[in-house]
Image (cartoon, helix red, strand yellow):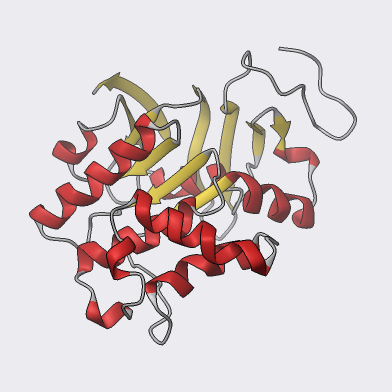
């Protein structure tokens, strides 16, 4: 890998992975300090679909927060698309996050009084996309997840699976290379859960890198790689 520039940027090419964790640890201070991540080293290349599995308290949420630049390592380095995130201040991290990462959560976080289309278009607003193109981008994102026919429905007019598809459309509306998903099927029945996983598979086939935290082993098997977190340490097995 080439040396970093003074700003932490590295040349954008196909050689470096989208994600590189180098000896990343995260310790939380307190009366009893907690080591949530312990010397994690891993890479994720562009176009992969990776599942992260672990028990409650294992460190998988901490790992996802670091991957999403919502938290910083106590030690070690996290490089996102060649950029050393340790070198960035909070404003620069927010800009990188807005450009490079889409988030999907267990709760859908849709604004109840806005239509599906308007909810998706909000992602373009936060990313600084001109108003004249936000609506078109949002409609294309809804088409990608099979929800264009419900563009003008309110969240309470949609099933749980449909709401999660809208949330996924919001995450991919600005075309980030990486989508991070935290228990995306946790609030869904098995039928709707499989539908959401089908959407992720389709997005992944079109080139989006997806990292999905899940406690469900069957759902994890849909990914190409499975990373297991236990007591802050990371291991890998074939999906």
Quadrant housing residue 202: top left
Query: In what quadrant of the picture does the N terminus appear?
Result: top right
Q: Residue at x 19, y 40 (%)?
A: 219
As displayed, is residue 212 above or below residue 24?
A: below
As displayed, is residue 162 above or below residue 86?
A: below
Quadrant housing residue 23: top right
Counting from the top left corner in percent of width and height, residue 218 is at 14, 37
Counting from the top left corner in percent of width and height, residue 34 is at 50, 49
Residue toward you, 134 or 239:
134
As drawn, is 228 to the left or to the right of 26? left
Q: Which residue is drawn at 79% across and 45% down?
A: 88
Residue toward you, 41 or 33:
41
Query: In what quadrant of the picture does the C terminus appear?
Result: top left
Counting from the top left corner in percent of width and height, residue 170 is at 46, 60
Counting from the top left corner in percent of width and height, residue 135 is at 53, 66
Q: Which residue is drawn at 62% across and 61% down?
A: 133
As displayed, is residue 35 above or below residue 1?
A: below
As displayed, is residue 41 above or below residue 208?
A: above
As drawn, is 131 to the left or to the right of 63? right
């Amino acid at each position: 890998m080439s040396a970093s520039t003074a700003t932490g940027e590295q040349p954008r090419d196909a050689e470096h992975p989208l994600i590189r964790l180098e000896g990343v640890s995260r310790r939380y201070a307190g009366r009893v300090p907690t080591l949530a991540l312990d010397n994690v080293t891993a890479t994720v290349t562009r176009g992969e679909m990776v599942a992260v599995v672990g028990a409650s308290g294992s460190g998988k949420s901490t790992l996802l927060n670091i991957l999403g630049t919502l938290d910083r390592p106590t030690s070690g380095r996290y490089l996102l698309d060649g950029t050393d995130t340790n070198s960035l201040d909070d404003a620069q991290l927010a800009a990188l996050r807005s450009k490079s990462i889409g988030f999907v959560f267990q709760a859908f976080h849709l604004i109840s009084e806005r239509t599906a289309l308007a909810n998706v278009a909000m992602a373009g607003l936060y990313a600084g996309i001109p108003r004249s193109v936000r609506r078109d981008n949002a409609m294309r994102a809804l088409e990608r997840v099979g929800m264009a026919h419900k563009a003008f429905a309110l969240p309470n007019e949609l099933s749980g699976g449909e709401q999660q598809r809208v949330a996924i459309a919001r995450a991919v509306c600005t075309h980030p290379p990486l989508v991070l998903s935290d228990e995306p099927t946790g609030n869904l029945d098995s039928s709707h859960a499989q539908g959401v996983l089908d959407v992720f598979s389709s997005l992944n086939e079109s080139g989006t890198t997806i990292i999905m935290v899940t406690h469900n082993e069957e759902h994890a098997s849909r990914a190409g790689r499975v990373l297991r977190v236990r007591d802050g340490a990371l291991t890998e097995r074939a999906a």
